[in-house]
Image: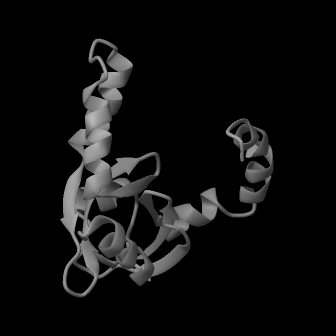
Amino acid sequence: MFRGRYQHTMTKTGRVSIPSKFREVCRKKYSDETFVITNFDRYLIAYPIREWNELEKKLSKISITDSKVTSSIRYLMGNAVDCPVDNQGRVLIPQSLRSYAAIETEVVLVGMLKKIEIWSKEIWEKENGSGAFETFIQSREVLAGYGL
């Protein structure tokens, strides 16, 4: 599972180092270091290819007659890009995804169990700054409903 938060600097060509702990998870659990990256909210999500394939299987079982569901699937799938990790442990984030997430130089990578969130440092600090603890406190009841 992916966990932890790491800050990295993106190269001018759009390459970001994947934290060694995350690459280790990929090698041990997935035997592959390829991610599918797509937009989500105000950040990007990177799925190991096996987790992405599972998501696709689940999505393919949903009826496309519900326009809201179809729009969500279109949004995720239409913006998804295969991004292999290079020999130096970096992934190239396409310009379209960097623009969407307002990623310029500083990047925050957050382990989220089976996926990784990729944030612009500025947006991360706004969204997860001083109010993050209060949001956590408010969500504890929801988590308790899941038995946590």
Q: Quadrant of residue 117?
A: bottom left
Instruction: Using the image, determine if residue 25 lies above or below residue 40.
Output: below
Residue found at x 34% / y 56%: 47
For residue 49, side relative to residue 28 (left or right): left
Q: Residue at x 26, y 33 (%)?
A: 74
Whether residue 104 is situated above or below residue 79 in the rendered picture: below
Seen at 56% across and 63% down, the residue is 124
Residue 110 at x, y = what percent?
Answer: 51, 66
Which colour scheme appears in the figure? one colour
Q: Position of residue 8 (x, y in %)?
A: 44, 81
Residue 143 x, y percent position in the rendering: 71, 43
Q: Where's residue 66, x and y in %? A: 34, 14
Q: Residue furthest bottom?
A: 88
Q: Nearer the viewer, residue 67 or 36?
A: 36
Between 53 and 64, the one lying in front of the other is 53
Q: Nearer the viewer, residue 104 or 69?
A: 69
Q: Is residue 18 left or right of residue 78?
A: right
